[in-house]
Image: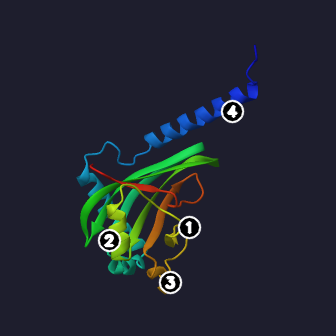
């Protein structure tokens, strides 16, 4: 009878405990899950846009030039080797909510910790907005342009940035993980 390698059992146990810890940490953070639906999401989106306008006034230019915005007021990310993030938000066209979306992301790496942040995707062309709305699960790729990442930077909405089809603004980071990115995040339409 062949005995199982103790290191293999240890590795599985560590991986499993990492998944469980990440899931529990993610579930414990307030991210709108189990809320009273669309009204709560809209209230958070309004507060997020007010914060963004007052803290980063340069984003008003992006808002005016965009054909639509996906506002994710609170995304919670947790990692213990394996990790993930989740949040809910609203797609607004002409300052009116037209749909609700979830944002989720899975990760694997050496990071341990948790953080929360907000982000807005500005759709700068009708084509990019139509592609987003028509997809059953739209994932952010490397082609998304970042106008601001909340590490003390100021907004730089240059001509090249404004010409990008989708512009991401990530802000309001709080927590123990370094950096926040929407790359690899998958968005799906939800009914709150």
Determine whether the residue tagged by mark 4 lies in a helix, strand or loop.
helix
Residue 50 visible within the image: no
Distance from label 1 to label 2 (Cα)?
Answer: 25 Å
Which numbered disc, 1 or 3, marks the residue that appears first in the sequence?
1
Which numbered disc, 2 or 3, marks the residue that appears first in the sequence?
2
Determine whether the residue tagged by mark 1 lies in a helix, strand or loop.
loop
Distance from label 1 to label 3 (Cα)?
Answer: 21 Å
Say the numbered circle drawn on residue 11.
4
User: Marks 1 and 3: which is nearer the front?
Assistant: 3
Query: Which residue is identified by label 2?
Result: 68
Give the percent coordinates (x, y) of residue 20.
53, 34
Give the percent coordinates (x, y) of residue 156.
50, 80
Query: Which residue is identified by label 1?
Result: 151
Q: Which class describes the residues within 10 Å of circle 4: few (<14), some (14-19), or many (20+)?
A: few
Which numbered disc, 1 or 2, marks the residue that appears first in the sequence?
2
Query: Which residue is identified by label 3?
Result: 160
Distance from label 4 to label 1 (Cα)?
Answer: 35 Å
CB within 8 Å, label 4 to label 3: no
Question: Which residue is rendered at x = 30% and y = 56% of the image?
Answer: 100
CB within 8 Å, label 2 to label 3: no
């Amino acid at each position: 009878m062949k005995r199982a390698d103790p290191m293999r059992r240890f590795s599985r146990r560590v991986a499993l405990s990492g998944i469980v810890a990440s899931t529990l940490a993610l579930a414990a953070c307030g991210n709108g899950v189990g809320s009273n639906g669309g009204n709560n999401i809209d209230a958070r989106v309004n507060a997020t846009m007010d914060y963004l306008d007052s803290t980063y006034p340069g984003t008003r230019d992006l808002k005016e030039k965009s054909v639509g915005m996906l506002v994710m007021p609170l995304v919670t990310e947790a990692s213990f080797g394996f990790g993930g993030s989740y949040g809910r938000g609203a797609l607004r066209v002409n300052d009116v909510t037209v749909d609700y979306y979830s944002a989720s992301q899975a990760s694997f790496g050496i990071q341990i910790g948790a953080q929360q942040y907000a982000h807005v995707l500005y759709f700068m062309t009708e084509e990019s907005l139509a592609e987003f709305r028509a997809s059953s699960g739209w994932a952010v790729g490397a082609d998304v342009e970042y106008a601001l990442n909340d590490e003390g930077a100021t907004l730089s909405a240059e001509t090249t940035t404004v010409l990008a089809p989708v512009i991401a603004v990530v802000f309001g980071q709080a927590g123990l993980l370094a950096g926040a990115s929407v790359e690899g995040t998958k968005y799906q339409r939800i009914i709150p």
